[in-house]
């Protein structure tokens, strides 16, 4: 039923791998630790009082979920078993004290002997105070209900009680048999519900007809006798069908809801749902009309579960298509009088559940429904959370990594290296994808495949399986399968699409392919010939109404051309280097099949008579073909060689058997189901043992012997293999995972050419060589230069690293911000695989070089500056030099801000200075400060748009080698509202030209605005290489532990794993800060823009604002300021008045200090007549206006 994802992250983003292991760079879709993917039918689900969820699956698993995560506080150990028979769990009941009653057919729980009903403690352990005794069950328990006095009503298959098959019993709270409860003999009971007065509503069969339908609803007294004041209600259905009553629900008004499979109740028509009065008579005021039905004459529809909301509306689930005359599939809500509640939306648009078996309510009246998987490949399966109006609650997502539903049928790699995937699936990594998807080389979805904004293969139901794919030389894609529609229009199992997914209408298949009586009809392979014609092979009988048994030869426009009578079971094609065509056949084919299971044709379908299969090779079928570099041909299928069964053979180009190929596992239980010929000519094979349903993947040397260097493993599913051009292998099919790595449907092996390099980095302050006593060198940037590509990553605080590298030469180099300060041993490490043995260990030792004193300070605004509110700030000071230093840090701000508190406390209450001692090289320390921002009514006032200036300074007794970064000026614009996920340039939107070629600082804030903790967060930033030097990027601070990956030239990923960021307002914030140098080639007037994508777990990314900054000076003017404006008084004290002398429209106004730093900004200044400058310090300033006539500025004095 489940897939639980445990993500272990070993330094950065590289999993430790060995050769031929799972490719760690493929499909890096992240799911939270303990994410629980429900992948099997749910028999029953129940929301607990704390909104956790208890699930019972058809796999006899009982689990408790906390949202989408497995609640590890509920642990069943080894669970339930039943000796040599399969255990079956049928029902559970949650007691008011949180303990859980479970019944079914089992004799052991977690290694302890039990009998068919047990009670669990809230943590999943066995409650030893509960002992079922005094009576034996036959066939196990069916249903449990709890009386108000703690006694337990149990419905069993049968019990042997005094020689009678009584199946309704009562147990005391300790599990012992309550003999005071005696039911009427010879009745057999099914469902039960307990009224508030303790009487019991029951479903039972006809008296003395033990195996008859359970078609009566009656009431028992508290002692088990029939309550004769209750009129038995009989339920009926169509002749030849059986009545099934699945649900009894006592409503808050005392009336009784009965749900099931029936057409009549109490002698009146009532389809699958009825309401009884408290005396058992049918409530005719409950007006359900035609009831729940399939929309046509059938008895396959039924109601399975019902729940009453606080407003007395009832939610009904089951298997139906319609309520009364309204289309509603499997879930509907009724008003208290039984009429349809039209305010409850139709869930059919997102719900992929075929039969809803259970419905339950959360404390906020949201709805949990569960059941079996549906046929139409919608987004949600097995269990889903629904809002009270019927819309989907996206806080709950039952998704897993990879593909779901059913299987991946075929994969093809394009010339550009992308991966085309076809099959019978409806989603990939939790996002919609129906039957076909194109992946990037790293396994992420290629979002350029848009189908022109249309639906693609969606809507094909169970017929959407894509079984064959072929890329044409012009990049168009041929797709074959079971589908009948594409982009909402008819498409008879064959279509050609353009690169963006739109249909290529120049390829006209008419009525398409008809599989006829062939079963299973299927397109197995598609190839494009050198002349542009297309071959389609498989099991079918006609194309566009004309005969086409097993093979179709089409022109590029879809016109059928001539073809030979080759039989109706073509399995595969393979084109040789000389252009000849190999055709593989199934043993059940017709036509020219007598010529052999493999044929070769020349041009124009002339049979190549020089190709004659070896007479020693006979019978069977060919499943797949590949051709080695030496021209030899590998065949997989079912063959007989010298009377021995074979599943893989090799022949020469003329068809004779190559006896030098010796695969020694043949003639045993294992057969080769598929193979992949690797670029190095080794052979990866997938073997399956039908006798014990066991499978494994192994690798052969080119002569067929087993390659002992390959770590054989079971792929945990039925799979196929596809060899990429780079030596990696795609494993696909009905796949759950590979080597424990989640990725349903598709995984990738790294290949023989992938190797591991790993090591640790230490700082040797005493210059006596690195040893175990030396500290780790945290956050060291590593550059790996390889023949194919290069990349950087920045380690976390452990100082260790691990990377997977292909065969070839690699150079690993530590990268320091100031390389002259330190010696690195070795400076670089050159590694050549496979000359070196994997895993290869390479440590780096960093030691001081000379004496260098270098401190750095940064000031971060952890919250936006909102006038009248408090704001949090963080000072980070760091020793970038190579000697231990002591000194002080200081914060400077004006009267627009009021100090509240700081951690650690300042040196004295009236100062904003902090002393530090023994700050080690590369050590960073932090100070958090809370300040109050003045309101617009304060003096001096702060209004939206004003720029607050805060200055942080770090100093010591030593002469600093780079004093520029000993002072940091934060220009923070006051705002009224803000986006909690944003990006800020700390230097402001206007930057002095003196920083061209220097560092600018960015802060990216993120906030979990969801309804559940965010396990993993990735902040992705695409750097503009025309404006920034990405080699200078250095993270400066973060809210949580992280690692950094820099790849693909300009992609930076800050990766926060397993941080469990809460969603409550007090704790749901995080950030990452970094610095990066601008290009020295920029000039005054140039702007640079940056934004980021923030990924919270498996949700779609949140895009931050575009943060734009401009290098500006104030000396360039479009008009003379004094010709249009008068500014007074001069000098000014609190208010600087501005008066226009000619017609001009002011757009915005800015005030700068003499350093060119923005201190006040008024973005909308159309009606401005004055500016409050009371908060500015005494000195010289510049006022700059932007208008319909351009921009201009002038100097003024603040008194």
Image (cartoon, rainbow, N blue to C red):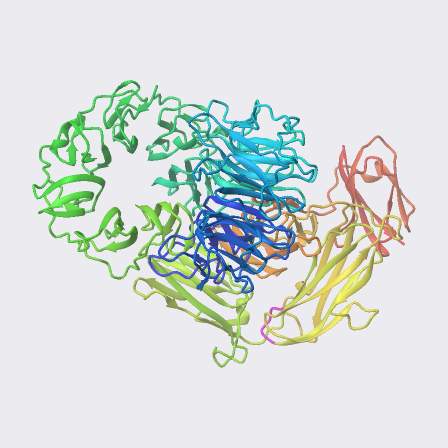
Q: What x and y, as percent, mark residue 706?
A: 22, 58
Query: In which quadrant will I find the C terminus?
Result: bottom right
Residue 856 sits above or below residue 1077 on the image: below
> As rendered, which of 492 and 676 lies closer to the eye?
492
Decide if residue 350 is in sight here.
no
> As rendered, which of 417 and 809 lies closer to the eye?
417
Which residue corresponds to the image point at 25% horizontal and 24% vertical from the top-left? 541
Residue 343 sits above or below residue 407 on the image: above
Question: Number of callouts in the render?
Answer: 0
Q: What is the chief secondary structure element of the magenta stretch?
A: loop
The answer to whether 516 appears left or right of 448 in the picture is left
Q: What x and y, as percent, mark residue 745?
A: 39, 45
Decide if residue 49 is in sight here.
yes
> As rendered, which of 712 and 342 lies closer to the eye?
342
Q: What x and y, as percent, mark residue 169?
A: 53, 50
Q: What x and y, as percent, mark residue 861?
A: 71, 56
The answer to whether 678 appears left or right of 608 in the picture is right
Say whether residue 162 is magenta: no
Which residue corresponds to the image point at 38% horizontal and 39% vertical from the top-left? 420
> As rendered, which of 157 and 663 lies closer to the eye?
157
> Which span of residues is magenta-colored?
879-883
The answer to whether 610 appears left or right of 940 in the picture is left
The answer to whether 665 appears left or right of 512 in the picture is left
Say whether residue 881 is magenta: yes
């Amino acid at each position: 039923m489940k897939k639980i994802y445990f993500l272990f992250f070993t330094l950065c983003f590289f999993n430790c791998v060995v050769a031929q292991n799972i490719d760690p760079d493929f499909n890096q879709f992240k799911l939270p630790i303990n994410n629980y993917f429900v992948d099997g039918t749910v028999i029953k689900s129940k929301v607990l009082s704390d909104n956790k969820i208890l699930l019972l699956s058809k796999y006899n698993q009982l689990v408790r979920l906390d949202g989408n995560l497995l609640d590890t506080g509920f642990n069943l150990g080894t669970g339930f078993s039943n000796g040599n028979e399969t255990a079956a769990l049928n029902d559970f009941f949650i007691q008011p004290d949180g303990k859980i009653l479970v019944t079914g057919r089992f004799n052991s729980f977690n290694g302890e002997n039990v009998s068919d009903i047990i009670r669990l403690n809230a943590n999943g352990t066995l409650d030893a105070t509960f002992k079922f005794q005094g009576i034996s069950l036959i066939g196990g328990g069916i249903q449990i209900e709890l009386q108000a006095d703690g006694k337990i009503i149990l419905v069993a298959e049968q019990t042997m009680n005094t020689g009678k098959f009584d199946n309704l019993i009562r147990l005391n709270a300790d599990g012992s048999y309550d003999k005071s409860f005696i039911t009427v003999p010879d009745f057999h009971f099914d469902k039960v519900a307990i009224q508030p007065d303790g009487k019991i509503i029951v479903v039972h069969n006809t008296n003395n007809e033990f195996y008859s339908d359970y078609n009566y609803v009656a009431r028992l007294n508290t002692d088990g006798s029939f309550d004769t004041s209750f009129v038995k209600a009989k339920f009926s259905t169509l002749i030849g069908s059986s009545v099934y009553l699945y649900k009894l629900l006592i409503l808050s008004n005392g009336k009784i809801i009965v749900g099931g499979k029936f057409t009549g109740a109490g002698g009146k028509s009532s389809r699958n749902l009825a309401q009884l009065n408290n005396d058992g008579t049918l409530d005719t005021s409950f007006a359900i009309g035609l009831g729940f039905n399939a929309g046509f004459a059938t008895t396959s529809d039924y109601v399975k579960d019902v729940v009453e909301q606080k407003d007395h509306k009832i939610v009904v689930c089951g298997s139906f298509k319609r309520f009364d005359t309204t289309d509603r599939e499997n879930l509907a809500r009724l008003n208290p009088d039984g009429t349809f509640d039209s305010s409850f939306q139709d869930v059919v648009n997102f719900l992929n559940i075929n039969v809803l078996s259970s419905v339950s309510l959360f404390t906020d009246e949201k709805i949990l429904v569960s059941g079996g998987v549906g046929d139409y490949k919608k987004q949600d399966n097995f269990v889903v959370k629904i809002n009270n109006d019927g819309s989907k609650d996206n806080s709950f997502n039952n998704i897993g990594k990879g593909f779901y539903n059913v299987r991946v049928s075929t994969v093809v790699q394009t010339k550009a290296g992308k991966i085309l995937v076809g099959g019978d699936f409806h989603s990939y990594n939790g996002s919609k994808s129906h039957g076909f998807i194109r992946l990037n080389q790293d396994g992420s979805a290629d979002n350029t495949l848009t189908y022109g904004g249309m639906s693609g293969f969606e809507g094909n139901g169970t017929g959407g399986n894509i079984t064959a794919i072929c890329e044409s030389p012009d990049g168009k894609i041929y797709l074959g399968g079971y589908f009948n529609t594409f982009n909402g229009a008819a498409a008879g199992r064959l279509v050609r699409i353009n690169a963006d997914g739109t249909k290529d209408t120049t390829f006209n298949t008419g009525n398409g392919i008809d599989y006829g009586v062939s079963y299973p009809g299927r397109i197995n392979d598609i190839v494009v010939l050198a002349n542009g014609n297309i071959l389609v092979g498989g099991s079918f009988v006609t194309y566009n109404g004309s005969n086409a048994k097993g093979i179709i030869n089409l022109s590029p426009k879809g016109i059928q051309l001539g073809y030979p009578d080759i039989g109706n079971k073509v399995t595969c094609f393979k084109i040789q280097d000389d252009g000849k065509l190999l055709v593989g056949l199934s043993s059940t084919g017709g036509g020219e099949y007598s010529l052999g299971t493999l044929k070769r044709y020349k041009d124009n379908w002339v049979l190549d008579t020089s190709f004659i299969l070896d007479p020693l090779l006979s019978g069977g079928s060919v499943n797949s073909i590949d051709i080695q570099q030496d021209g030899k041909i590998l065949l997989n299928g079912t063959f007989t060689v010298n009377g021995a069964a074979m599943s893989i053979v090799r022949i020469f180009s003329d068809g004779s058997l190559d006896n030098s190929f010796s695969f020694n596992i043949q003639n045993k239980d294992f057969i080769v189901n598929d193979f992949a010929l690797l670029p190095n000519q080794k052979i990866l094979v997938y073997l399956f043992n039908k006798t014990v349903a066991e499978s494994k993947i192994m690798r052969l040397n080119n002569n067929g012997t087993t390659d002992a260097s390959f770590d054989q493993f079971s792929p945990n599913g039925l799979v196929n293999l596809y060899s990429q051009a780079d030596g990696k292998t795609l494993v696909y099919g009905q796949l759950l995972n590979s080597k424990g790595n989640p990725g349903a449907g598709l995984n990738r092996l790294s290949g023989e050419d992938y190797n591991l390099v790993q090591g640790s980095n230490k700082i040797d302050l005493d210059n006596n060589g690195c040893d175990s006593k030396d500290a780790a060198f945290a956050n060291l940037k590593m550059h790996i230069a390889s023949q194919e590509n290069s990349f950087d990553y920045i380690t976390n605080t452990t100082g260790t690293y691990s990377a997977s590298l292909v065969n070839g030469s690699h150079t690993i180099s530590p990268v320091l911000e100031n390389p002259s300060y330190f010696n690195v041993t070795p400076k670089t490490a050159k590694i050549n695989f496979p000359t070196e043995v994997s895993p290869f260990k390479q440590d780096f030792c960093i030691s001081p070089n000379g004496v260098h004193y270098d401190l750095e300070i940064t000031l971060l605004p952890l919250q936006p500056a909102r006038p009248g509110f408090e704001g949090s700030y963080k000072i980070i000071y760091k020793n970038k030099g190579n000697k231990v230093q002591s000194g002080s840090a200081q914060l400077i701000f004006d009267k627009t801000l009021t100090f509240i508190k700081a951690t650690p406390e300042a040196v004295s209450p009236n100062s904003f200075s902090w002393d530090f001692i023994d700050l080690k090289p590369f050590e960073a320390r932090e100070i958090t400060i809370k300040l109050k921002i003045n309101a617009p009514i304060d003096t001096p006032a702060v209004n939206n748009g004003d720029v607050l200036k805060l200055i942080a300074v770090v100093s010591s007794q030593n002469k600093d080698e780079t004093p520029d970064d000993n002072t940091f000026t934060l220009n923070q614009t006051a705002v009224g509202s803000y986006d909690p996920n944003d990006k800020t340039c700390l230097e402001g939107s206007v930057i002095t030209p003196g920083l061209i070629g220097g560092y600018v600082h960015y802060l990216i804030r993120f906030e979990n605005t969801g309804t559940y903790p965010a396990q993993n967060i990735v902040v992705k930033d695409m750097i503009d290489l025309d404006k920034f030097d990405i080699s200078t990027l250095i993270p400066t601070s973060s809210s949580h532990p992280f690692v950094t990956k820099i790849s693909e030239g300009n992609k930076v990923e800050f990766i926060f794993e397993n941080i469990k960021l809460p969603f409550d307002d007090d704790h749901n914030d995080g950030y990452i800060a970094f610095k990066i140098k601008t290009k020295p080639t920029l000039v005054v007037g140039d702007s640079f823009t940056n934004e980021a994508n923030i990924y919270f777990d498996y949700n779609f990314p949140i895009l931050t604002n575009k943060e734009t900054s401009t290098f500006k000076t104030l000396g360039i003017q479009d008009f003379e300021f004094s010709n249009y404006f008068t500014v007074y008084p001069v000098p000014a004290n609190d208010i600087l008045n501005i008066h226009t002398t000619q017609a001009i429209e002011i757009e915005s106004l800015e005030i700068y200090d003499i350093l060119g730093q923005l201190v006040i900004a008024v973005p909308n200044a159309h009606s401005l007549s004055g500016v409050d400058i009371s908060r500015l310090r005494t000195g010289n300033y510049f006022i700059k206006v932007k208008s319909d006539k351009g921009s201009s500025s002038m100097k003024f004095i603040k008194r």
